[in-house]
């Protein structure tokens, strides 16, 4: 898409402009929003402004650093499996992914359409809530947007009530979690209990399935969404007209896509292929159904679910880029919210002894963005150690 200028504004951008927002630029991200480090961008890598030997996270890493470095007050990103919350965690800012269907996806480049949601990165809940109020709501161009009441998100300071909270014990005890992130999160839970919060551990037996399910379903959707980049309708085209159509498509797609995007198109095509469809795609859809059911039960009893956002602080540049599986596994805490379509936020509460910030992720039931923002504000006011 290098050099591509859109012919129209996305609904989110249009609404921001109508509210007199001043848009100052486009941000770098991983190619087609696939990645966790910004190392997959054809424009080069974004660096973490707190430590340039570290990645900013991804895929919306440019959006995170723009806010982190004070270039702007707010930015938008896309969150299909954590791409707003994870870079916010690595950069020490707020990253908020509303529930699926809150913000129109019209004008957002599709990666996996049943997961994609526009998210907001900022430094205060007030800014994030205000932006949410402006860009959310029904849109004739995206039939998946809910017609449910648009809450007055910027009234998040009204009637704050203490939520009943759950956490997945097996997520906090997971072997991949950095021990200090684990300890600090457990200390926070202990402190909150002393302060009168009800916080209960749950054993979420589906935890190990979330990453495989996410990668089967999103790559399947991506292989379909990205088929339009054939050099005729979108994307760069090879210039030779001496070739037949199949060679034209193949050469164009081979030259135009980066390594990670090709990997995902191939994986997605494989899981959708006749011999494997039921074993992978259908199975993953079934798991997604079970996850939704489980989530429904959890939020019958609890108002909020807390979890770390990522398994570690910001990765070193090049640390994981040669090991895609390790990179995928690091998404264990963020993909769940997209699989079940609930809102999630990462708030910058903690500081690690390595000097880097890390966040707490909070999720709420569908359409409970307002109480999620209220609770996040309360947490930032009372428990923020990272300055
Ligand atoms: N890291 C995840 C992935 O690579 C998240 C991507 C996203 O949310 N756009 O798929």
Image (cartoon, helix red, strand yellow):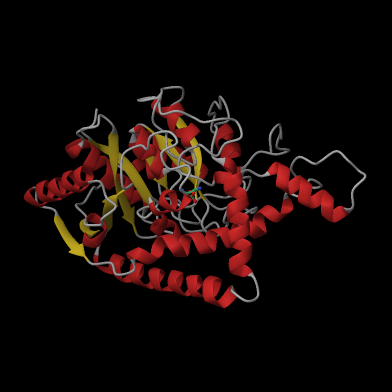
> In the rendering, at what x and y percent does residue 377 appear?
27, 40
**Residue 242 seen:** yes
Would residue 94 be visible to someone looking at this image? no
| Quadrant of res 212 | bottom left
Q: Residue at x 57, y 26 (%)?
A: 25
Give above or below for 93 relative to 337.
above
> Which quadrant holds the N terminus?
top right
> Seen in the image, is 155 located left or right of residue 189?
right
Query: In the rendered image, which quarter is residue 301 located in?
Result: bottom left
Q: Whole-percent x and y of residue 137?
A: 52, 50
Say how many tags the image has. Answer: 0
167 in relation to 65, above or below? below
Q: Quadrant of the C terminus?
A: top left
Residue at image coords 20%, 33%:
353
Along the viewing direction, whichever of 288 and 150 lies nearer the viewer: 288
Vertical order, 2 against 217 (above or below): above
Q: Nearer the viewer, residue 94 or 222?
A: 222
**What percent of the width, then of the height, locates residue 160?**
23, 47
Spot the residue most to the front.
322
**Residue 283 image position (x, y, % from top left):** 49, 75
């Amino acid at each position: 898409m290098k050099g591509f200028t859109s012919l129209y504004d996305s609904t989110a951008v249009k609404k921001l402009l109508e509210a007199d927002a001043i848009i100052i630029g486009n941000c770098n991200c991983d190619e087609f929003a696939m990645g966790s480090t910004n190392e997959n961008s054809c424009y080069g890598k974004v660096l973490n402004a707190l430590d340039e030997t570290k990645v900013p996270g991804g895929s919306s890493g440019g959006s995170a650093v723009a806010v982190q470095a004070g270039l702007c007050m707010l930015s938008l990103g896309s969150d299909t499996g954590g791409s707003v919350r994870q870079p916010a965690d690595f950069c020490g800012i707020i990253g908020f992914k509303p529930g699926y269907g809150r913000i129109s996806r019209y004008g957002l480049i599709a990666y996996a359409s049943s997961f994609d949601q526009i998210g907001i990165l900022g430094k205060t809940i007030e800014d994030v809530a205000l932006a949410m109020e402006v860009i959310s709501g029904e849109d004739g161009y995206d039939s998946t947007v809910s017609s449910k009441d648009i809450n007055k998100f910027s009234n998040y300071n009204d009637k704050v009530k203490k939520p009943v909270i759950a956490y997945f014990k097996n997520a906090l005890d997971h072997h991949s979690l950095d021990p200090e992130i684990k300890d600090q999160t457990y200390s926070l839970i202990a402190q909150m209990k002393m302060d009168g919060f009800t916080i209960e551990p749950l054993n979420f037996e589906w935890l190990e399935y979330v990453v495989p399910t996410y990668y089967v379903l999103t790559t399947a959707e991506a292989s379909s969404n990205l088929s339009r980049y054939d050099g005729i309708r979108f994307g760069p085209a090879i210039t030779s007209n001496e070739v037949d159509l199949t060679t034209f498509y193949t050469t164009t797609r081979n030259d135009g896509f980066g390594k990670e995007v090709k990997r995902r198109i191939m994986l997605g095509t494989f899981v959708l292929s006749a011999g494997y469809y039921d074993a992978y795609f259908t199975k993953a859809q079934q798991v997604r159904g079970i996850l939704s059911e489980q989530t429904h039960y959890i939020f019958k009893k609890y108002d909020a679910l807390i979890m770390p956002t990522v398994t570690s602080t910001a990765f070193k540049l090049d640390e994981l880029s040669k090991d895609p599986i390790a990179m995928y596994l690091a998404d264990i805490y963020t993909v769940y919210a997209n699989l079940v379509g609930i809102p999630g936020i990462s708030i910058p509460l903690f500081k690690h002894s390595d000097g880097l910030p890390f966040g707490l992720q909070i999720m709420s039931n569908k359409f409970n963005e307002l109480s999620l923002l209220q609770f996040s504000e309360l947490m930032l006011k009372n428990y923020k150690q990272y300055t």
